[in-house]
Image (tube, rainbow, N blue to C red):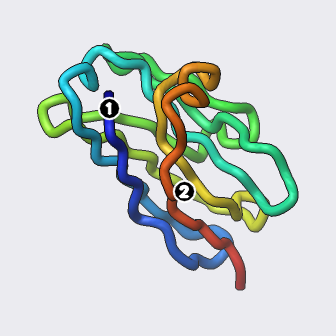
């Protein structure tokens, strides 16, 4: 079972940047498709971006061109670089396996809170 710990969230002004990190433990990390998800207050959790074991990435439309997902299989870490942040990006961000049906089966961590506000 892959264990995941998210970090890097915080308060940032609109237009600012943050980089989230997800430290993974478990022997299957390097072969797993990973995703960053987020859940805003009063809304359902949604996929933000996903990345294959060979670093092929996909993005949700609201974050295309602003967010970049990456991974370092040697370090067992997945990153989410977030630029040009908007207030609507405010949410708790989670890292987990992809797709979400597998993520729901393995359970969710605490996530990391990102607040975009002036």
Residue drawn at x 74%, y 32% as measured from the top left: 61
Q: In the rendered view, tell whether residue 13 sits above or below residue 70.
A: below
Question: Which comes before the other along the chain, label 2 or label 1?
Answer: 1
Q: In the rendered view, tell whether residue 75 sits above or below residue 91.
A: above
Judged left or right of residue 69, residue 4 is left
Q: Quadrant of residue 77?
A: top left
Picture coordinates of residue 89, whole percent (x, y):
70, 58
Picture coordinates of residue 42, whole percent (x, y):
87, 58
Q: Nearer the viewer, residue 63 or 74?
A: 74
Q: Which residue is mark 1?
A: 2
Q: Nearer the viewer, residue 107 or 47?
A: 107
Helix, strand or loop status at disc 1: loop
Q: Which residue is mark 2?
A: 83
Q: Quadrant of the C terminus?
A: bottom right
Q: Nearer the viewer, residue 49 or 65?
A: 49
Residue drawn at x 63%, y 38% as measured from the top left: 48
Q: Is there CB contact under 8 Å for labels 2 and 1? A: no
Disc on res. 95:
none
Residue closest to the far left: 74
Residue drawn at x 39%, y 61% as measured from the top left: 7
Picture coordinates of residue 65, whole percent (x, y):
61, 39
Q: Quadrant of the N terminus?
A: top left
Judged left or right of residue 30, residue 12 is right
Gap between marks 2 and 1 measured at Cα? 28 Å
Helix, strand or loop status at disc 2: loop
Residue drawn at x 44%, y 27% as measured from the top left: 34
Q: Nearer the viewer, residue 45 or 15?
A: 45
Q: Quadrant of residue 92?
A: bottom right
Residue closest to the far bottom: 118
């Amino acid at each position: 079972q892959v264990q995941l710990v998210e970090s890097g969230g915080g308060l940032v002004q609109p237009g600012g940047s943050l980089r989230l990190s997800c430290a993974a433990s478990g022997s299957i990390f390097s072969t797993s498709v990973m995703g960053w998800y987020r859940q805003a207050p009063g809304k359902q959790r949604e996929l933000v971006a996903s990345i294959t074991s060979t670093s092929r990435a996909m993005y949700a439309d609201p974050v295309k061109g602003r967010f970049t997902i990456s991974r370092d299989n040697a370090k067992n870490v997945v990153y989410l670089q977030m630029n040009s942040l908007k207030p609507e990006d405010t949410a708790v961000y989670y890292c987990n396996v992809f797709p979400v049906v597998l993520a729901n089966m393995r359970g969710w961590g605490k996530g990391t809170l990102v607040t975009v506000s002036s």
